[in-house]
Amino acid sequence: MKFLVRTFGCQMNYSDSERLKSVLERLGYTETQDPKKADLIIMNSCSVRQHAEDRIFGFALQYDLMHQKNKNFKVGLTGCMVRKTSTRKQEKNGEKVDKLLKRIASIDFTVRIEEIAKLPEILGIKNAKISKENEKIAPQELQNYFHIDPKHTSKAQAFIPISTGCDKFCSYCIVPYARGREHSRPMKDILAEVKSLVEKGYKEITLVGQTVNSYGLSAADKKTKEFAQKNTSKTASVPASPFTRLLQEIDKFHSKGLQRVRFTSPYPLDVTDDFIDAMGKLKTVMPYIHLPIQSGDNETLKRMNRKYTAEHYTDIIKRIRKRVPNCSITTDIIVGFCGETEKQFMNTYKLFKKIKWEMCYIAKYSPRPGTVSEKLLKDDVPAKEKARRFHKLNDLLREIAFARNKTFVGKTVGVLVESFKKGFNTGKSEHFKIVQFKSKKSLVGQIVPIKITKAYEWILEGKAVGRI
Ligand code: SF4
């Protein structure tokens, strides 16, 4: 039996898919990249943007035909499109049906990623404890999503989930309903995973969480022994933030071979001084931060239920740039949110010019079913106007990104190679820049010093100048 997992959306989803694949393999399935050969396709969905959902609907249509050809063929849906209340059974009982699922007739089952333990039962696999290699999946391993050993897809870098769920309730976002409240993973378990990855030769890890820097701070976390104690220290040597403590502990693996630590995505209000200090001080933490702002206008931020102001965000950036000179800073912005006036959009535009984000995921607002903004606010910015704002911001981004990339020309950067194709190695620099260079052989998994010779908007080109 063969499976294919299609992943949409953010790095959290890619990390979840690694755990999902591991479970499927240990249930006796083998992975294929060819949908025609698959007996089971699971789509790990993203609901942040309409575009991502549309792609899933598109794939689902193709799978309709495959159902007709292969009676045993199954399609599952997981990720953010699956709410706690999602079920196709409701349809049969004549109760209220999940609107999204109603649109995808070819879906055979849904499963929330946190409830992966239900997968053997859903797939009708009775002896779920035995895999083809005769390994046992311990019941507690399946019950606790964090305990599942992931199947890492990259030889270069690995994702490590450190928390799941979200407590922020931004008015446009489905995540708190799809994934539930925020829970952090015990630090000792995270460190054990880091240790095992470093022993396998991984040089870079990315810590993932919906609001990664609120690690250990959620209401649920505070009820646990590990995070119950409140550390009110304001000095950098005794960090108040559990996330900073985690970064410090992980940094100790530098002597064992760990070179790079990244994290995604932090929430502005949970950025602390000790965290900024750690960014500047710790050897493994890279000079790069993706800090979503969503809007540069305070009124819009309020409607979005983002609980900081543009001024607060700007101050964080100022402090980061002071402590980590030349730090690369990127963000997420939604244009055309409910009630966004031209003046409010221009506040975002002006802030963009001031902060100079060198990369930005710009989304045109579209209401996500089940969210507060969908229920209570009016989606009143016309589609044409949303598109105009999108392009205006995107043009500015391209200008800034190109100017920033040109500053790397002539400099030597360390590139962790992620792929090799047609004589070109491609990887990322310390500043998370995509760098490409020619080579006769694959250098995947290695950090190679590259002198940058040419800059484009989204990519840098260079020549190898030796090995680190
Ligand atoms: S912080 Fe806001 S946008 Fe991010 S996952 Fe949580 S609710 Fe969604």
Image: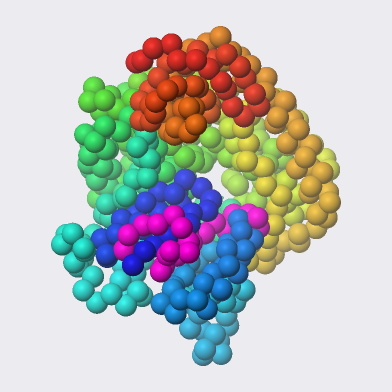
What span is colored magenta in the figure?
29-51
Which quarter of the figure is the C terminus placed in? top left
Tally of numbered tags: 0
Q: Position of residue 14 (x, y in %)?
A: 44, 49
Quadrant housing residue 378: bottom right
Asked whether 468 falls inside the magenta stretch, the response is no
- 440 or 395: nearer the eye? 440
Residue 192 visible to an observer of this rendering: yes
Could you tell me which residue is drawn at 46 percent across and 52 percent down?
13
Q: Is residue 379 above or below residue 319?
A: below
Quadrant housing residue 402: top right
Q: Position of residue 116 (x, y in %)?
A: 35, 64
Could you tell me which residue is drawn at 61 percent across and 17 percent down?
454
- 284 or 163: nearer the eye? 284
Could you tell me which residue is drawn at 49 percent across and 27 percent down?
424
Quadrant housing residue 59: bottom right
Q: Position of residue 296 (x, y in %)?
A: 69, 37
- 422 or 122: nearer the eye? 422
Horizontally, is 170 left or right of 221 in the view? right
Residue 84 visible to an observer of this rendering: no
Horizontally, is 238 left or right of 316 in the view? left
Q: Is residue 417 above or below residue 179?
A: above
Q: Position of residue 55 (x, y in %)?
A: 61, 59
Could you tell me which residue is drawn at 58 percent across and 32 percent down?
330
